[in-house]
Structures are given as C-alpha cells and as structure tokens.
Image: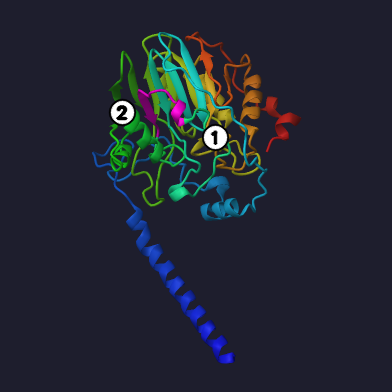
Amino acid sequence: MGRAIGRVLKWLGTGVLFAIVALCLAIVLVPPFLDRVYYRGPVSSHFDGKRFFNPDVEDTFRPPAGRSRGGFFWRFVTGSDDRPPWPEQVAVTPSRPPAHVEGERMLVTWIGHASVLVQTAGLNILTDPVWSDTAGPFGFGPRRVTRPGVGFEELPKIDLILLSHNHYDHLDLPMLERLWKRDRPLIVTSLGNDAILRSRGIESVARDWGGRVRGHGAIDVIVTRNHHWDSRWLTDRNRALWSSFVVRLPSGGNLFFAGDTGLGDGKWPEEAARYGPIRLALIPIGAFRFAPGQMGIGSHIGPIDAATVFQRLGAARAIGIHWGTFRLSYEAYDTPPKLLREVMRCRGYPAGLFDTVTIGRPVEIAPYAAPPAAPPLDPACLDTPAVQALR
C-alpha cells in the first residue's frame, strides 16, 4: 500500500513539475507567437512604426484604479472585489425594423452595447455589430445579459458598417462574417483592423484619422480621432488603430459614432464637429468605474465626461451606449443611465437631449436643431443622496 501511494505521489510530482515547465515555456514562447503585425506604414503623430499610440496623453496603460492589472483581473474573475451584483438576464423584446427609411427621416434601434442600427436616407448603417453571447476569444469572456434587440434574421440588409477597433466586445468576427456573406456591406474601419477581417475573407476599407470614404448615395464617412487602445491577444496591443466616425448625410445633420473611448485631451469631439452639425451622437457611458466613486478611466468615459463630449460636439441629440450588455467593470447594471440623467440635470439641459433608450425599441430622431447652451458642470450639484447611493 505504501509503495503504491509513493508511486502516485511520484507521478503527481512529475506532473506538477511538467506543468511548471510548460507554464514557464508558455510565458516565454506564447506571447511572441500571439503577437500580430496588422499594419505596416510610415511613422506618424500616432504611429511609431510598430504600434499606434494616443498622441494627446498615453494613460491607457495605467492599471484601473492604480492597482496592478493582474490583481484587478483576479479580483474580477473571483468576485472578491465587492462589486454590486448584476442580473443574470434582462428581458428584451426584440423588434423587426423596416427594410428602409427614406429621405431625411431617421430611425434608430439600439441592439445592445455599442451596436446600433441607424436607418436614414434609404441606408441601413450598423455600428460595431456584436451578436455573440460572450465578449472574448474562444467563447470565454464576459457573457451578455441582454439578448440582441434585433435578431439576425430580422436585421434588414446592411449597407454600411462602422467598425471602431478590434476588442472582442466591438469586433465580432463570426457576426461580421455572416453579414459580409449575406449583404456585402461597405465596412469602414481604422488602420490595421482590415487585416483581421481579411483573415476571414471579409473585405473592408481602412483609413487613418482624417481619412474619408465615399459611401452609398451622397454620404461621406470620415474616420476621426478618439482616445483608446486595442488588442486581440494582449501581446498584439496597439498593432491596429482605434477611431470614432462622422457620417456626413445629405440632409438633416450628421451622425457621430464615438466608438470606445476615454476623454484624453477632450479636443477630439470639437474636431469631429468641424465636419458639420451633428444630428445624432452615439456616446459610451458605461464600464467606467473600477473603484468606488471613480468617474472614468484612461480608456473609458463615464456619464460626467460623456456629457462634456456631448457639449463639445454641439450635437442636437445623443444616445448613451456601451452599458448594460456585458459586465466589463464594477458599477451596478443601471448606474450609467441613472448618473447620466443626474449629470444632464446639473448641466441644465432639457430632458431627453442625451439619454438612454430601450434595447430593441426604435426611436425617431428629429433633424438637426441647434442645442441650447449649457453652463459648465458644478460638481456640488452631484453631491446628492441619489448620486451618493450609486455604486
């Protein structure tokens, strides 16, 4: 009996030793293997010849809340961070949008997260289409708590896709492949992301910040600056570029899609506004709190910074996106819309100018009309029991 136990322990010890050796080899060999070169081109104000960077301030490498990034992920995975609970599932009533919306009329349906269907001028425009159940490689990653607001079969023929960057909660290769095979849409993205799509036989047009693409009909798509980073495999960080977009429409005002962004120098919204009046802005408001009381990080804006973006865009209307679909940070499920309403109230804006909408419920967007002026935010205005109770 003792000899048998000894053999078992020896096998276990050998197995552990091999596991340690394999782990050490993986640490050395796997990261270079997982690195990718998505783009080659000349050095610029935001490309050093190998990787892209934010030219205003590079704060996206900083670990959330000032702690180690590894510790953050460990607490997140193990649930040992005292984060507020999220619902397992949120009820959604999917809709079936019309085939087309003609003329100056604009109909908008939030699909979930950063996926929005915008129908106007006879065109169907889709932003960062993500229909997968998880946001990560090989089926791992945060699981969605809301089903898409429009099923794939009910989705009208898509003419234009705006693809902001390559994070898994924004670049869903299986869905993009289905859309490409079905509709052959024009896909506009920023430098390097076209290589990822090409690996699956998907054609796209990639541009640097400031680059333009002539779209269907009388529209122009302009790739514009924002403040973020990207990676598919950790070691390929910033091998491709991130961006926002302005879609110049024939009448009624432009469409602005912020993609995924931090505030940075805060000047990029004004740069986008120079291309003409913005009828509708799609602005992220979630995944901003990685520590109690935190209102934004280098790579994500919360409602306070989002209201600043809205004001600097001069947009007539905005919809808050990038919340309530995938749990990516520590704030409660409904904190982003609640805080946004408090911030807009404190800024003195009329209700409804910048708010959230129900997933799957189409909303009409009026043509551009100059928004009212609003004073700067008085932080004391947010010092209320309602705001203090938010987590």
Circles 1 and 2, Cβ within 8 Å, touching? The answer is no
Q: Residues within 10 Å of mark 2 (few under 14, many from 20)?
A: some
- Residue 135: in magenta span: no
In the image, what residue type sits under mark 2?
Arg
Residue 155 among magenta residues: yes
Which residue is drawn at the image coordinates 38% and 20% (left, top)? 247
**x and y percent of residue 293 in the render?**
65, 39
- Residue 184's disc number: 2
- Spatial CA span between label 1 and label 2: 25 Å
**Residue 173: x percent and y percent?**
38, 40
x, y (%) of residue 176?
37, 35
From the image, tell me which residue sits under label 1.
147
- As drawn, 358 above or below 134: above
The reply to whether residue 258 is visible in this rendering is no
> Farthest residue toward the right?
385
Sequence-wise, which precedes: disc 1 or disc 2? 1
Which image quadrant for residue 329? top right
Q: Amino acid at mark 1?
A: Arg
Magenta-highlighted residues: 152-164
Which residue lies at the image location 56% right of the left edge and 51% below the top edge?
A: 72
Foreground residue, 156 or 347? 156
Q: Is residue 336 placed above or below 195 in the rendered structure? A: above
Label 1: element kind: loop
The answer, for residue 16, to whether it is visible in the render is: yes
Q: Is residue 311 above or below residue 258?
A: above
In which image quadrant can residue 147 be found?
Answer: top right
Q: Does dot 2 land on a helix, a strand or a loop? A: loop
Quadrant that contains the C terminus = top right
Q: Is residue 366 left or right of residue 190?
A: right
